[in-house]
Image: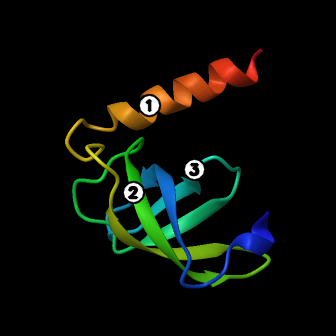
Amino acid sequence: MKADLKPSVRLPCIILATSADNVSFGQVKGSYHKLKIKDTPEGATAGQLCVVEIAKVTTEKVVSTFVEWVDSSKNDGGAAALEEIHYAQMYSSI
């Protein structure tokens, strides 16, 4: 629930898209909540898993700050996230 998203909470996210100004857009892992991720390191790509800290929650948007990469997702080019998305799609189709 969006009510569970409060400032200072850390959550794992999947990066969906990146921009040139170190801002990414992602989705909270295991939910449909989309958010803006500030201070994303250069070289981030769609599909990578990261941990973010929620900074601001409004009815229109959720803003967070990048904290760290999850496990080896930075080193494997996002393969771990893509595999997880694949399994989630398989599970939802059953």
Mark 1, Cα crowd under 10 Å, few <14 / some 14-19 / many 20+, is some
From the viewer's perspective, tell me whether residue 68 is left or right of residue 90.
Answer: left
Position of residue 83 in the picture relative to residue 74 (left or right): right
Place of residue 79 in the rendered image (x, y in percent of width and height, measured from the top left): 34, 31
Badge 3, how many Cα within 10 Å: few under 14, some, many 20+? some
Which element is circle 1 on?
A: helix
User: Which residue is nearer to you in this view: 6 or 59?
Assistant: 6
The mark that comes first in sequence, 3 or 1, is 3
Query: What's the CA distance linking mark 1 and mark 2?
Result: 13 Å
Whichever of labels 3 and 2 marks the residue nearer the N terminus, that label is 3
Q: Is residue 27 left or right of residue 39?
A: right
Relative image position of residue 4 (x, y in whole percent): 74, 71
Under circle 2, the secondary element is strand
Residue with the mark numbered 2: 50
Q: Amino acid at mark 2?
A: Cys
* Residue holding disc 3: 29
Judged by depth in the image, the label closer to the viewer, 3 or 1, is 3
Task: Classify residue 40 as left or right of residue 35.
Answer: left
Q: Which residue is disc 1 drawn over?
A: 82
Circle 2 Cα neighbour tier, 10 Å, few/some/many (<14 / 14–19 / ≥20) = many
What's the residue at 23%, 35% (across, down)? 76
Hey, which quadrant is residue 3 in on the image?
bottom right
Counting from the top left corner in percent of width and height, residue 43 is at 22, 54
Q: CA distance from mark 3 to mark 1?
A: 12 Å
